[in-house]
Amino acid sequence: MDPAKALNDKEFRDHLSNVNTKGKRLWIFPKKPSGSYTKARTIVAWSLMALLFAGPFLKWHDHPLMLFNVMERKFILFGIPFWPQDFKIFAIAMLTGMVFIVLFTVVWGRVFCGWACPQTIFMEMLFRKIEYWIDGDYKQQQKLAAMPWNAEKIRKRALKHTLFFFWSFVISNTFLAYIIGIDELKLMVTDGPIEHLGSFVSLLIFTGVFYFVFAWFRELVCIIVCPYGRLQGVMLDKKSVVVAYDHVRGEPRGKAKKKEELNLGDCVDCNLCVNVCPTGIDIRNGIQLECINCTACIDACNEVMVKIDRPTGLIRYDSMEGIEQGRKWKLSGRAIAFSGVLVLLLGILTYFMVSRDDVQAMVVRTPGATYQFQGSDTVSNLYNVAFINKTFDEQEISIRVEDPKASMMVIGDQAFITPGGEQVKGTLMLKYPVSAITRNRFKIPLAIYRNGEKFETIEAGFVAPVRN
Ligand code: SF4
Ligand code: SF4
């Protein structure tokens, strides 16, 4: 192809690679990838899958290591319990997550999509592998699809879809175990589905959704549903690292035998990079939203380059700027700076998570109540107190006044026993001698003790009559 035409021909951007001119979906049969990137991705993906499936069984001090119980608003991250009252940490985590996603993508492109996204991992490393195992590589798959319904096709389709449904059910159970906990899930199994009809119906619905996604919807998740994919257009720039075709070296493309006489580039136009692509695109057209950076085309092209005795890396991880300037990608100042910000953000979030108080104490004046006189020489204020125990263990909380002029009367028990993960509420009264009052609003320091040890001082606002 003429290089000028290759660069200016943007026709491919006017349609999706998996939809024909009549708007009908074209089924993609990607060639089975192989090569060093595929091997590395397989190791990473299988490790992540092993972690995901093992996650619900991992416990820390008899509690799940990870739990995301949205219904009961109970969350455990790496053994640390979080409660709705930790919304400050959640807000910071959300903000960090958003900034992280943007900065990470600006520098490293869609590395996440190719290496760690659950959709890619399940699709390419589990369901697609089952498909290759049963139906064979892309040519056999195309043949099978075109074949009339005979015994072989029925047998293969039945086996494949049974396995697809089975793994969708396993994935659905795993996610449910992260939500309700593995012990609850075991109860569901031993008690039978009728006893837990609601959860069982949800389980079946999610199994159906996973089956639909991995058996039929597939690459459409990345192409038309995933918001992260849609945002690539505004997050990537010429310096971002992406899976890219080196058009400077590759064009003009042409078959190998004519290379010398036509002064062609290194691309032999073998189309293997297109054949392996799970989203059906041609990476030689440049950066496209459909590219999930799965690296299959890198492996395919490297194999070709080795065969024709050319340097590998015609398709590689690089920035468009690096390719245009003809230099290999190296860690730039910008990438280092952005990565530094990412590490800093993670550090701040980690600090907030580990430095969080195990007990949150709140003392507020009882709404609607004002000061009261206790005799002629003492003024009192009434307070509502609440202690949230953010640990799994019972805590005994007590309060002492740190202002020597003030006195305190706890209404009810003097110590607040808070079971793990719960909160206790109470009422107390603070008294102050009229003769010591100099302002009508001031603060009284209160020391909070946990199991006999002081861990925090908080201030209770006190209102008093204005002295004449
Ligand atoms: S695999 Fe490499 S050589 Fe073959 S068409 Fe793609 S870019 Fe060209
Ligand atoms: S263009 Fe290459 S990296 Fe992108 S999705 Fe297709 S095969 Fe994967």
Image (cartoon, rainbow, N blue to C red):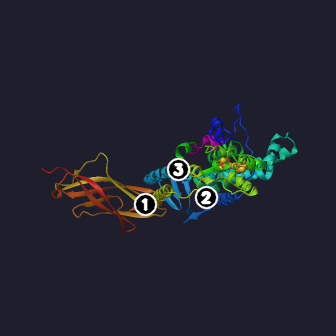
Instruction: Give the mark, 3 or 1, whose residue is nearer the N terminus.
Output: 3
Label number found at residue 356: 1
Instruction: Give the mark, 2 or 3, whose residue is nearer the N terminus.
Output: 3
Amino acid of disc 2:
Asp
What residue is shown with label 3? Answer: 106
Q: CA distance from mark 3 to mark 1?
A: 32 Å
Instruction: Give the mark, 2 or 1, whose residue is nearer the N terminus.
Output: 2
Q: Tags 3 and 1 in contact by the CB under 8 Å rule?
A: no
Category of crowding for the residue at label 2, using alpha-carbon neighbours closer than 10 angstroms: few (below 14), some (14–19), many (at least 20): some
What residue is shown with label 2? Answer: 183
At 84% from the left edge and 41% from the top edge, which residue is drawn? Answer: 147
Residue 228 visible in rendering: yes
- Residue in front for this viewpoint, 261 or 278: 261
Amino acid of disc 3:
Val
Label number found at residue 251: none
**Which residue range is magenta in the image?**
220-229
Q: Secondary structure at mark 2?
A: helix
Q: Position of residue 178 (x, y in %)?
A: 59, 54
Q: Tags 2 and 1 in contact by the CB under 8 Å rule?
A: no
Frontmost of labels 2 and 3 is: 3
- Residue in front for this viewpoint, 466 or 358: 358
Which secondary structure class fits the magenta region best? helix
Please tell me whether residue 108 is drawn above or below residue 231 in the rendered image: below
Q: Position of residue 266 (x, y in %)?
A: 70, 51
